[in-house]
Every structure is written in structure tokens, then in C-alpha cells.
Amino acid sequence: MRKRPFPTFSLSFRRELAGVVHVDGTARIQTLFQRENNPFLFDLLTYLDDTLQIPARINTLFNRRGEPIVHTTTDALQSARAMRLDAVVLNGNLTALS
């Protein structure tokens, strides 16, 4: 696979990644091949791949339906709690929402 630092093209995807696929069978991807580009995200993705054996994750806008996109830590915490998320990463730190 070629390095793709920006989600500017689409590919066909396998069944295990059905949740990220558009109705036409494609998905826009972004790759991270070098740890030095984003050590936190690289380590997180590597850990999740080692744990779940699926080397991909969904990235989407962070907001609830009908609300603006999250811009602040307060927005993020309020939205995450309203969406009943277990945790959220804020400024590189995992924050539990129990």
C-alpha cells in the first residue's frame, strides 16, 4: 500500500471493515507509516492492531446529530457523555467517562 497522509482517494474494502465503507463499496483512507509523524496515534493504532488484528480505525467528525462539531475540551466531554462513550482522548490523554 502506498503512503497516504491525507484522505484524498478511495479503495475497495474487505468485509471486516464494512462499517467504514460507503454505499458504493469504497472508503476514503489516510495512512500513518512513520511513528515520528504522530507518536501517540501511531502507538495507539499499533496497540489496537496487535489486540484486535484489524489494522484500521474509523475517524469521523465529533458531534451529535444536530449539534455543531466539538471545538473545546468542555464540548468534547459534554458530547461524549451525551453519546454514552466510555472514554475520550483529550490532548493525548485517555479520559474515562464513568
Image (tube, rainbow, N blue to C red):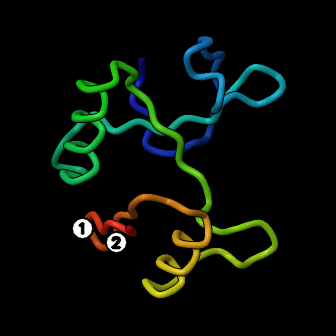
Q: Residue at x 62, y 60 (%)?
A: 61
How far across and how far down the image is residue 71, in percent?
54, 82
Q: Which residue is at the front of the view, 94 or 13?
A: 94
Give the residue at the far front of this rendering: 98
How far across and how far down the image is residue 16, in percent?
55, 16
Within the image, what quadrant is residue 32 found in? top left
Q: Please, what secondary structure does the residue beneath circle 1 have?
A: strand
Amino acid carrying label 1: it is Asn
Q: Quadrant of the C terminus?
A: bottom left
Gap in angstroms between the C-alphas marked 1 and 2:
5 Å
Residue position for label 1? 93
Within the image, what quadrant is residue 89 found in? bottom left
Q: Which residue is at the front of the view, 80 or 31?
A: 80
In-image side of 85 versus 98 (left or right) = right
Residue position for label 2? 90
Mark 2, other Cα within 10 Å: few <14 / some 14–19 / many ≥20: few
Q: Residue at x 39, y 69 (%)?
A: 97
Q: Are marks 1 and 2 in contact (CB under 8 Å)?
A: yes
Amino acid carrying label 2: it is Leu
